[in-house]
Amino acid sequence: MKTPVAIVIIDDHALIRHAIRSLVAARPNLRLVGEGDTGEHLFALTSEYRPDVVILDLNMPHHKTEDGSPQRFQALPELVRLRRAHPQTAVIILSEHLVPALVHEAMISGVKGYILKSDDLSLSLPETIDIVSQGGIFFSQGVQQELFGTAGAFEPPLLTPRQKEMLAVIAAAPNDSYAQHAAKLGIQTSSFKNQLDKIFKKLDVNNLTACMIRCHQLGIISLDAAAAGETDYYA
């Protein structure tokens, strides 16, 4: 019999934690090992329990100050730090909010799943856990439609071998500047930028973050390789 998937929940809403706890308890292949209700619990509980999956809310306090006022959780830097220290742990974002730029940044930070609290959790959450615990990536239907539109609404663009090489160079060293990328390719920075603009037009995107996400969706680059660079692609 396979070892149950070990799960940590971090959400400041007690009702959400209760709902997830009930879902996990009903499935013999899942096991809840830890719970937290503030952002500071993310790294602490992951370090303590080494779970297979963390289910995380983004919009919650980092910790409570002495006067009881909340300090907001800066999730994206913490996700990068978590991925560096615990690459074996898959993170699923469970959020009330669907902000495309935030979803993009979360993906670049290494998040493997993103579902909304307005989704049917009894259906979407167990499926998401199953997929990400096996190394996959899952975004609920509402998130996919907001990010990418209707599936199959566009054909994969025809990129030249040189353009694919450019994207591979960016994905391999995302912290490098455009000038550094251009030097590796043996071209001028201005030529690099011009080619990148042409790629953006072909992919129907307007920034490098969206470009990387679209390239992953189309199988042009690996998101895992991109996320390992620990950057936000706004160089």
Image (cartoon, rainbow, N blue to C red):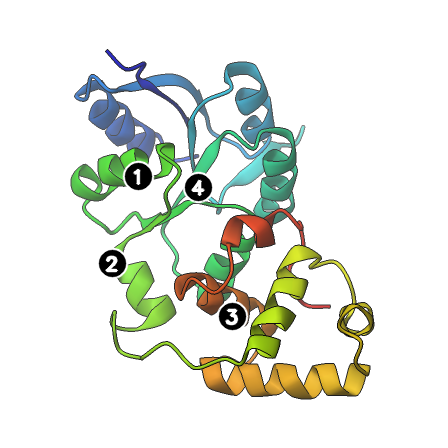
Q: Select label 1 or label 4 by which is in front.
A: 1
Residue 152: quadrant of the picture: bottom left
Q: Looking at numbered disc 1 in the image, what kind of residue is underneath it?
A: Ile
Query: What is the distance, in whole Å, between disc 1 and disc 4 at their CAs?
Result: 19 Å
Upstream in sequence: badge 1 or badge 4: 4
Q: Select label 3 or label 4 by which is in front.
A: 3
Q: Looking at numbered disc 2 in the image, what kind of residue is underneath it?
A: Gln
Mark 3 element type:
helix
User: Which mark is on residue 131?
Assistant: 1
Query: What is the distance, in whole Å, between disc 2 and disc 1 at their CAs?
Result: 15 Å
Residue that numbered label 2 is attached to: 141
User: Which mark is on residue 57?
Assistant: 4
Q: Select label 2 or label 1 by which is in front.
A: 1
Mark 1 element type:
helix
Upstream in sequence: badge 1 or badge 3: 1
Upstream in sequence: badge 2 or badge 1: 1
* Residue 73 in sight here: no
Residue that numbered label 3 is attached to: 210
- Residue found 31% across the figure and 62% down from its top: 144
